[in-house]
Amino acid sequence: MNSTSAPSPKGSGRFPKKTHQNPGKDSCEKPTAVGTGLVSSELFSRHRCLWDSSHPECPERVTAVVRMMETEGLLSRCLQVEVRAALEEELSQVHSKDYIELMKSTQQMTEEELKCVSDRYDSVYLHPDSFSCACLAAGSVLQLVDKVMTSELRNGFAVCRPPGHHAQADQMNGYSMFNNVAVAARYAQKRHGVRRVLIVDWDVHHGQGIQYTFQEDPSVLYFSVHRYEDGSFWPHLPEGDSSALGSGAGEGYNINVPWNKTGMEDGDYVTAFQRILVPVAYEFQPQLVLVAAGFDSVAGDPKGEMCVSPQCFSVLTHMLMGLAGGRIVLSLEGGYNLQATAEAACASLRTLLGDPCPHLNSPGAPSESALTSISKTVAALYPFWTCLQTLEGGPLSEAQPLPSAVCVEQLESSERVTGLVYDERMMEHHNMWDSHHPEAPQRIFRIFSHHEDLGLVDRCRRLPARLATEQELALCHGLQHIATIKSSEQMKPRDLNRLGDEYNSIYISKESYKCALLAAGACFNVAQGILTGQVRNGVAIVRPPGHHAERDTACGFCFFNTAALTARYAQSITHNALRVLILDWDVHHGNGTQHIFEDDDSVLYVSLHRYEEGSFFPSSEDANYDKVGRGKGTGYNVNIPWNNAKMGDPEYLAAFHHVVMPIAREFAPELVLVSAGFDAAQGDPLGGYRVTPECYAHLTHQLLSLAAGRVLVLLEGGYNLNSISTSMAMCTSMLLGDTPPLLPPLPPPHPSAVISINNVLRAHAPYWRSLRVQIPEALRLSLRSPKPKIKHTPRGKDEFSPSQPQRQRTPVMTSPASPPTDQEDSGLDELTQGLHALDLSVSTISTSSSPASVPVGGARPKVKSSPQRDSFSAEQEASPVQAMDKDMESTPIKQEKEAVPQAAEESEAGAVCDQESAALEGACGYTKKSVFELVCGAVDMAGDTMYVVDPLAWCPHLESVCPVPAGGIDVFRPCEECGAETENWICLCCYKVLCGRFVNEHMVAHGLMTSHPLVLSFADLSVWCYCCESYVHNQVLYEAKNAAHLAKFGEEIPPIN
């Protein structure tokens, strides 16, 4: 039985945690659904051909599969599920009553009569036991559907026959009697209320029976990849071509990928899944996945004549397990080479049981013929799926791609355990001059504690940390740099401060060198454990981070480049040609990692990062999409730079589907290192992005299909203690084999992200063949603006109306568990936010000495209080950003931002509600608006409409508000940390008074350290929620607001309605 389990999806919040704010279970906790079910029976052997003992659809097909499963120890790991016959009423959901009666009548027929009836159909034989076996085959799939949908099992495999995917409503066809998978889909809808079913058919023959059954039904998405040869291969039907999309309400829900030549390989199948099925399925969001699992495309099959390896089906199965909360059922269809069929079936079963995907021996790049078929299918589906409309179309390079990878070394087989390394000694690295620095020791402590709370530590194998040696550091760093950082151990505080000032965004304590050695050495131990088979994969909870560290200098909180060093160390203990993928999803570009490997073809570096046209830290054009490496490393450096929007789950998933995973699969790494910074997570004060923990889970799950599952997730950045703890726990849960949680309906990627993704595709198409999906540029131009409509079918399915063929197929929906959407153009506001508040900018971007100029997120020189500041008038206090605005008036960004209201005045609308801009002001710890303006709106003296923002009427963190202290609220109290008397806020949880971001940031740091979300501004008495990133106005806040108003103005405010 499978020992792994899946986390239960939660929809009550993006950062579920065990606190008074959210007493529910965490989304990483183990659910009740465990184990893989298997249905098999000797009864299936009774169906056989009486007049042809050598018929390929023979009883041995099932017995050979079961025998190999038993030999390889897989059978004992499964939960045996009893077979049962499908009832007539269940079969009648797909098949006509007359046809069922005909099949029943065959039980009493003679051999001659059976042969006579068989000859009336295409490629069919009948036996007196055919009807009972066909009922058992259909019923076996229904049994697994019951177990999976009731969470008794995690997934299942029905090793049954006769096959079913060719059977139609009123006729048998192609060895098929009843359409097992189609019956199961209808059963799941009727019995379990499933609204959306995905059927994947990878049998080498087109499953026309399934297509006919659901071709008008938008509740079932059918995907078939099959040998077609322009209609010359059986079943010789035009409906098997890519142009057959379904009809009526089901148009766009039928997907055919037809192969027009034999000999297709692993790379062709994997690319079809990656470029078409996976993105469409994520948009469709099935609640159950059924697989018509024919294995006649495996190399050696006499009918398929393809060259797919058995191991490929492990990867295809893994790709599907990220859908529907892991609810997936495989049903055996074709496969006529007994050995090959058994091997492929066992490969699929291993993946269902939670074993890692094996290496694929055939090249990862698709053939030209496969790319032509895939491109035609994408073009046909383009009007119906917004995920495919991410592709802009137009010509892509046809240059000779990089050579395909070949696995030259079989590494040790691994135990089924995840390694974890954590050493609290790494907390000794600290900032002696700023206890609220975001790169704080508590980061790793909180992450590890959360892992303990969820039971993840107990499920992992603890590995010891060790100090990296100077010789190991020299794998990536110069000796002088190593010596300089080492010398800090003997320095006095004044010298440490001086040394830190020599670098960009670095603080140093006496313990920094040792902690940096521990971080690197800890990762070395996990990598060694993975490569020697001691553990399957690993997670390293380490600090200080590393990806900004260059060969000869520290940078951006980083001393030594942990990920780069780990890659070099891994190569040193195996062989120099070991292919390593470094996937960097930290919100900042890993400049150090890129520079270390930019001329190296053994390391593929892929980075998704906030760029803002070069203005976001590390503020270098080297982070742009056109920097692809140099020398023999050309093509092996992939930058996905985000501009002008708050990116979140839709953008990161789109980048993975269209760029990251296709390139990674073609590269075929032997080790995957994740530079796992979580500062793109929702709620992070430096990144300002909206990636959810659930999304990080899906990204990790996808990476686990690479490198035989040898994945090491090592911590980089991330400065919101709640979000980094939950996000990294999600990643560890995936490493342990848990099922990715359900995602809420997601909007399309932001237009700016679409531009970035297409820029990357064009830049790297010359090097990676899997990116060359060619669609006509005119196709995108022909699309009308998508206007989704909800159509309620007779079955009550909430699907889109098919009346508009050129539309968005999935509604843009949000739920309490989904991130907010930004459809409007907020580029200027986002850029302003990046530079003024959340950015990690350097002096090359702006020469202003204003406190708003930030050397690195939160680590700016602190502003000392002065008598001049203390003498501010009440008028100045009410408009607290005048001094800052004056410093910034000369900058181009400020001029652009101020041009927006003028354009708004000249427009016919006459007003623009820039909610994003106002929200950013709150996030930065100040506001230009009064409470009256925020709540009611405002008009200036000339009668023109001013910018306003509607606060949230409720947020889930209101229950964290504590009663006002007995002494009330003193709005004239200075900051408790630095004594500043302007821009102060009061925490509504503990009632500490601290200064805002544009003074000394003490309230921002307080929110990070304590997770206290709600704060009240003394300037205008507005309330900001750090977690929701929005103003809030609710009756719960009345007591605090009234107390502050009474202290400030001597009168109470009206009750909040």
Image (cartoon, grey):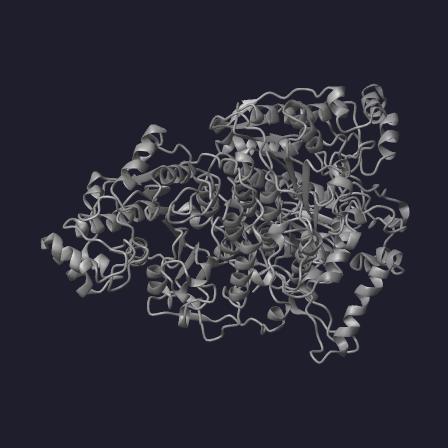
Report x, y in % for residue 231. 42, 63
Q: Nearer the viewer, residue 127 or 80?
A: 127
Question: In the picture provided, is 564 more to the left or to the right than 162?
Answer: right
Q: Is residue 648 visible?
A: no
Towards the viewer: 59 or 740: 59
Residue in the image at 51% along x and 62% along y? 377
Q: Is 652 situated left or right of 433 in this image?
A: left
Q: Residue 1038's x, y, as percent?
A: 60, 57
Examine the rendered structure and indicate whether residue 115 appears above or below residue 148.
below
* Outermost residue to the bottom: 908
Residue 417 or residue 174, whichever sits in front: 174
Residue nearer the viewer, 617 or 329: 329
For the point 58% across and 51% down, which residue is it?
653
Q: Quadrant of residue 635?
A: top right
Quadrant of the rendering where the N terminus is positioned: top left
Task: Identify the residue at image location x=52%, y=38%.
Answer: 360
Tell me residue 344's x, y (percent).
40, 40
The residue sitting at 35% across, 66% down in the picture is 796
Tally of marks: 0
